[in-house]
Image (cartoon, rainbow, N blue to C red):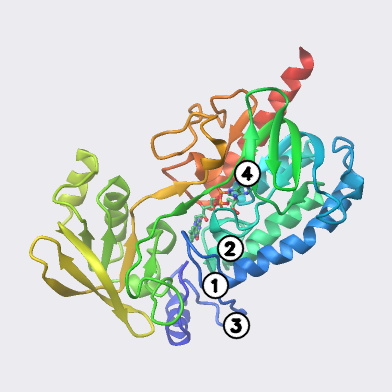
């Protein structure tokens, strides 16, 4: 969800009295400054959370190690990062990643007494431990929080729940895995975990473009009208009955633009080429929507406004002319980058780097390695769907281990 300035939050609070959803409407709630970046720099809050998590590592490790018979050798001595150097641990389930997918997998695996070890990452992929939700303010579509919940808060809750059931968490980024031999090996700078199964839940980051006004902080409208998630933010009062811009030319752009027409007075699709990449059916759907106008061979070169985004400067790439287009919202729909590079091609991925899973399962191309959340999902990319596949991955790992024992 987007961050709203005080004046708008007041309006929003007023609006929320009569509408079911309003981002940032809870004025009484302490608000953290989450100047975030889905692609690049981690937020102050994210860094704080990562630092906090880092300082927690030793205690969580030692606390968890008390109940971990599978984690071997040095687990009981894992009180400092230095002690942990070159440590080798053994587990049935190693989870890589700490968003809703990773933590849901951890909760299920821990409750099944599989004593999971999690690498939550240290600003891995430029995202703090806890995942993409640490980069947003209000999350209003996760069940169980009728008043909404701050992104950072729900991530903290996920982590606590994982720890409560005995997940051993290391605030380290996995740099290498070896899935060519069993048991598998998962490596960070400080330790190696030898695991019977691996659950990869490393997420993805939304790609963004960078031009004047596109960033966070002073003069930037990121989260003040600029977003990378129409489904998450599109219903916000600041976008209702207002002109909006979607950047992109693929299926996501068509889908997001069509979705936004439910709320917007008009939606411009700005695309840098003459032709769309989207499938014919998605193109047709967008083109036949009277609220959508296409600006081909064009690019947004600046975002302008006051407290909030008010307009964008659009350059015609053919004529070189630039014109101002009124827009209260700007949505990047130019794709996501899944965090799968560290796998070095050991698992099957699609051309965009998403891990391929067997339909209806979280099974990857390597038996015993499962993938959950956004790293394997280029379609839904929501916290609740990530959590759902995290649950599936843990249950599938449990079944796999049971079958191994039966052999
Ligand atoms: C700005 C924004 C707002 C959003 N708002 C909403 C919303 O309101 N509602 C909603 O449902 N969804 C929302 N989403 C989408 C939602 O955040 C994601 O769908 C969800 O977080 C995906 O969960 P995940 O567990 O797959 O991965 P992520 O949340 O991406 O977490 C993956 C974690 O793994 C870590 N990691 C990556 N590589 C490694 C490695 N090599 N070693 C160790 N750790 C690693 C990363 O650092 C990260 O912490 C939003 C997304 C963004 C960017």
Question: From the Cβ of disc 4, is ligand 1 less than 8 Å away?
Answer: yes
3 vs 1, front mark: 1
What label sits on residue 134 in the rendered view?
Answer: 2
What label sits on residue 28 in the rendered view?
Answer: 3
Distance, label 2 to label 4, CA atoms, is 22 Å
The local crowd at label 2, few if under 14, some if 14 to 19, many if 20 or more residues have their Cα within 10 Å, is many
Judged from the image, the secondary structure of the residue bearing numbered disc 1 is loop
Judged from the image, the secondary structure of the residue bearing numbered disc 3 is loop
Direction from residue 152 to residue 224 in the image, left or right = left
What label sits on residue 235 in the rendered view?
Answer: none
Direction from residue 161 to residue 261 in the image, left or right = left
Of pointers 4 and 3, the one earlier in the residue sequence: 3
Q: Position of residue 171 (x, y in %)?
A: 71, 54
Q: Can residue 292 be seen in this view?
A: no
Most distant residue in the left direction = 319
Of pointers 1 and 4, the one earlier in the residue sequence: 1
Distance, label 4 to label 3, CA atoms, is 42 Å
Asked whether 359 or 196 is in front, the reply is 196
Q: Where is residue 118 in the image (x, y as percent from the top left)?
A: 72, 45
Most distant residue in the top direction = 407
Q: What residue does disc 1 label?
A: 34
Question: From the Cβ of disc 2, is ligand 1 less than 8 Å away?
Answer: yes
The local crowd at label 3, few if under 14, some if 14 to 19, many if 20 or more residues have their Cα within 10 Å, is few
1 vs 4, front mark: 4
Distance, label 1 to label 4, CA atoms, is 27 Å
What label sits on residue 175 in the rendered view?
Answer: 4
Direction from residue 376 to residue 309 in the image, left or right = left
């Amino acid at each position: 969800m987007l961050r709203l300035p005080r004046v708008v939050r007041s309006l929003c609070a007023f609006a929320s009295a009569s509408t079911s959803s309003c981002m940032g409407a809870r004025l009484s709630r302490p608000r953290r400054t989450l100047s975030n970046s889905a692609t690049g720099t981690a937020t102050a809050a994210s860094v704080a959370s990562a630092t906090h998590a880092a300082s927690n590592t030793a205690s969580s490790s030692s606390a968890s190690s008390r109940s971990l018979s599978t984690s071997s050798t040095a687990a009981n001595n894992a009180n400092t990062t230095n002690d942990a150097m070159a440590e080798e641990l053994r587990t049935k389930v190693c989870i890589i990643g700490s968003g809703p997918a990773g933590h849901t997998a951890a909760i299920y695996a821990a409750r099944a007494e599989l004593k999971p070890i999690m690498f939550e990452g240290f600003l891995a992929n430029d995202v703090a431990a806890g995942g993409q939700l640490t980069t947003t303010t209000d999350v209003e579509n996760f069940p169980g929080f009728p008043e909404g919940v701050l992104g950072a808060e729900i991530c903290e809750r996920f982590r606590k729940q994982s720890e409560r059931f005995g997940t051993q968490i290391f605030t380290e980024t996995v740099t290498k895995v070896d899935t060519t031999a069993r048991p598998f090996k998962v490596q960070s700078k400080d330790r190696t975990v030898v695991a019977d199964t691996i659950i990869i839940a490393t997420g993805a980051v939304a790609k963004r473009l960078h031009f004047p006004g596109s960033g966070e902080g002073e003069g930037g409208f990121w989260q003040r009208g600029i977003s990378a998630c129409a489904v998450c933010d599109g219903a916000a009062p600041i976008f209702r009955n207002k002109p909006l811009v979607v950047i992109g030319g693929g299926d996501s752009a068509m889908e997001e633009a069509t979705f936004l027409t439910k709320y917007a007075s008009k939606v411009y699709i700005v695309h840098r080429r003459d032709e769309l990449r989207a499938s014919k059916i998605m193109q047709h759907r967008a083109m036949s929507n009277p609220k959508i106008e296409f600006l081909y061979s064009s690019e947004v070169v600046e975002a302008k406004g006051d407290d909030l985004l008010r307009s964008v400067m659009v350059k015609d790439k053919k004529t070189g002319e630039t014109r101002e287009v009124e827009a209260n919202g700007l949505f990047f729909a130019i794709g996501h980058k899944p965090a799968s590079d560290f796998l070095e091609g050991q698992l099957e991925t699609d051309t965009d780097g998403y891990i391929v899973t067997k339909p209806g399962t979280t099974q990857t191309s390597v038996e015993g390695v499962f993938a959950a959340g956004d790293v394997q999902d280029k379609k839904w990319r929501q916290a609740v769907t990530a959590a759902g596949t995290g649950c599936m991955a843990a249950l599938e790992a449990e079944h796999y281990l049971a079958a191994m024992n039966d052999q």
